[in-house]
Image: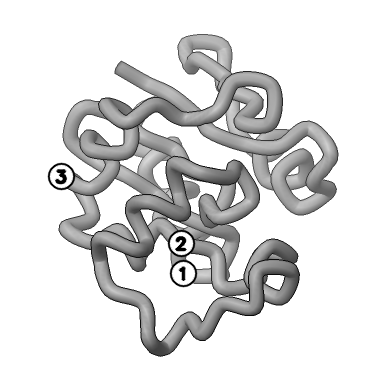
Amino acid sequence: MKKVFHLNTCDTCRKILAQFNLKDWELREIKKEPITKEELEEMHKLTKSYEALFSKKSTQIKLRELDVKSLEEKDFKELLLDHYTFLKRPVFMTDKEIFVGNDKNNIEALRTFFAAEE
């Protein structure tokens, strides 16, 4: 399995996806096709944390007046399944590895991963 969960409207996602050869990857636009409970559980197996998958920059946080500091793992899971903007993106996922978000360390890890695949 090789999947990328992303948003077409996200410039950062588009910029990151353009850097890699994704011909063997399934591209999932999460607004049109939200993540399933099963997919979220697969992500959780690799990250060991729903919070690690959660975007603390989501516009929904302010709209829903959420106090992120008071949220527990089960809350992160429910929110991730409830609205696509709560997923930190992009998420590159294989059977054994996961790369979550757009921070510098994650992008470097992705570059290393793709270089090893060539």
**Amino acid, disc 1:** Asn
**Amino acid, disc 2:** Phe
Residue at 32%, 44% in the rendered image? 98
Mark identifier at residue 105:
1
Task: Relative to 29, say whether 101 is above or below.
Answer: below
Residue density around tag 1, few if under 14, some if 14–19, many if 20 or more, within 10 Å? few
Q: Quadrant of the N terminus?
A: top left
Left or right, 9 with respect to 83, comes to: right
Residue 115 drawn at (x, y percent): 43, 39
Q: Quadrant of the C terminus?
A: top left
Which one is closest to the eye, mark 2 or mark 1?
A: 2
Left or right, 61 with respect to 36, comes to: right
Task: Relative to 80, say whether 14 is above or below.
Answer: above
39 and 63: which one is in front?
63
- Give the residue at mark 3: 45
Looking at marks 2 and 1 on the same chain, the residue that comes earlier in the sequence is marked by 2
Residue 16 drawn at (x, y percent): 67, 45
Secondary structure of the residue carrying numbered label 3? helix
82 and 46: which one is in front?
82
Extreme residue in the front direction? 64
Residue at 69%, 21% in the rendered image? 32
86 and 98: which one is in front?
86
Looking at marks 2 and 3 on the same chain, the residue that comes earlier in the sequence is marked by 3
**Amino acid, disc 3:** Lys
- Give the residue at mark 2: 54
Secondary structure of the residue carrying numbered label 2? loop
Residue 41 drawn at (x, y percent): 23, 38
Residue at 28%, 73% in the rendered image? 72
Q: Are marks 2 and 3 in contact (CB under 8 Å)?
A: no
Residue density around tag 3, few if under 14, some if 14–19, many if 20 or more, within 10 Å? some
Q: Give the alpha-carbon distance from disc 3 to disc 1, as whole Å.
A: 21 Å
Q: Give the alpha-carbon distance from disc 2 to disc 1, as whole Å.
A: 17 Å
